[in-house]
Amino acid sequence: MAARLAKALLALLLPFVLASCVLTPGKFVSTLRIDADRRFTFTYVGEVIAVDLGSEFTKGMKDAPTPEQGADPTAADSDEPVLQKIAAQKRPAPEQRKSAPNSDAQAASEAKNRAIAAALAKEVGYRKVIYLGDGKFSIDYAMSGTLDRGFVWPYNLDAEIVFPFVVLEVRANNTVRIKAPAYANQNNAAKGMAGLDGAGKTPSQLDGSFTLDTDAEIVSQNNEDGAVTTGARKSVTWKATPTSKDAPSAVLRFP
């Protein structure tokens, strides 16, 4: 039952995923200041790399086993028939692929990335968005507010971004849960499909730091070096590299 439900959900989500884009960090410096009165400021300055999920997923499907190669299309717990069918609908026929030069695909990709830059530049918080070419952006982002609700970055409907860097989840017990999934090479569905898990087609370009600064109570955090105390405030700094496996996470409690 669970396997069938997972396949049904995957079939529903794949058309959106295949048309969407994953943004991943390159070289960056990111900070998150959270005060005990719930005020916060988040910043990200550095590179962002765009990966077209549809393109990468379709490439991966070319290597998927066909029924003639031994795959059982009637297997109850196999996702291959569903995935192959959806990917085939998105992939041009062999004769069409031969007639479409690589330059056309590259031009389409560059046009999409320029459109992403334009969409992001319209959003509050982006102090600079420059598309550098070859899927790379230079971004300067800062956002301040009050944690009376959750916060997710980046998320943009026009750019169809599906994988956030940082998530703040405000909970009912006067705590906030912080996680930065993009600042590590954890395996997850979106990054796995895009070939971003370190063994795929797009090697990680992670090279940065993420610093949490707060005067609220730190209930938990997963940095083995712990917090540094300066006066009434504490800070925790995580390094993000291609070998980072654990995404930065913490829980803070407000008075």
Image (cartoon, rainbow, N blue to C red):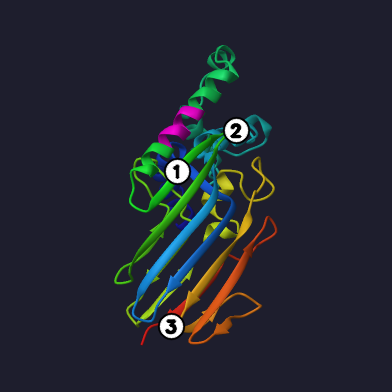
**Bounds of the magenta span?**
110-116
Instruction: Using a 10 Å C-alpha cutoff, classify the residue at mark 2 as few (fewer than 14 neighbours), some (14 to 19) or many (20 or more).
Output: some
Q: Earlier in the sequence, mark 1 or mark 2?
A: 2
Instruction: Using a 10 Å C-alpha cutoff, classify the residue at mark 3 as few (fewer than 14 neighbours), some (14 to 19) or many (20 or more).
Output: many
User: Circle 2 sits in a helix, a strand or a loop, which is it?
Assistant: helix
Instruction: Report which residue position mark 1 lands on.
Output: 129
Type of amino acid at the residue the image marks with label 3? Ala
At horizontal 66% and vertical 78% (from top left) the residue drawn is: 225
Nearest to viewer (mark 3 / mark 2): 3
Q: Earlier in the sequence, mark 1 or mark 3?
A: 1
Residue 50's x, y, as percent? 53, 41
Q: Earlier in the sequence, mark 3 or mark 2?
A: 2
**Does the segment drawn in magenta span residue 111?**
yes
Residue 212's x, y, as percent? 51, 72
**Does the segment drawn in magenta span residue 12?**
no
The C terminus lies in quadrant: bottom left
Instruction: Using a 10 Å C-alpha cutoff, classify the residue at mark 1 as few (fewer than 14 neighbours), some (14 to 19) or many (20 or more).
Output: many
At horizontal 61% and vertical 47% (from top left) the residue drawn is: 196
Could one spot residue 77 in this view of the protein? Answer: no
Q: Quadrant of residue 176?
A: bottom left
Instruction: Report which residue position mark 3 lands on.
Output: 216
Q: Is residue 48 above or below residue 223?
A: above
Instruction: Report which residue position mark 2 lands on.
Output: 59
Could one spot residue 84 in this view of the protein? Answer: yes
Residue 64's x, y, as percent? 63, 36
User: Alpha carbon of mark 1 to alpha carbon of mark 3: how far?
Assistant: 32 Å
Q: Is residue 109 above or below residue 169?
A: above
Nearest to viewer (mark 1 / mark 2): 1
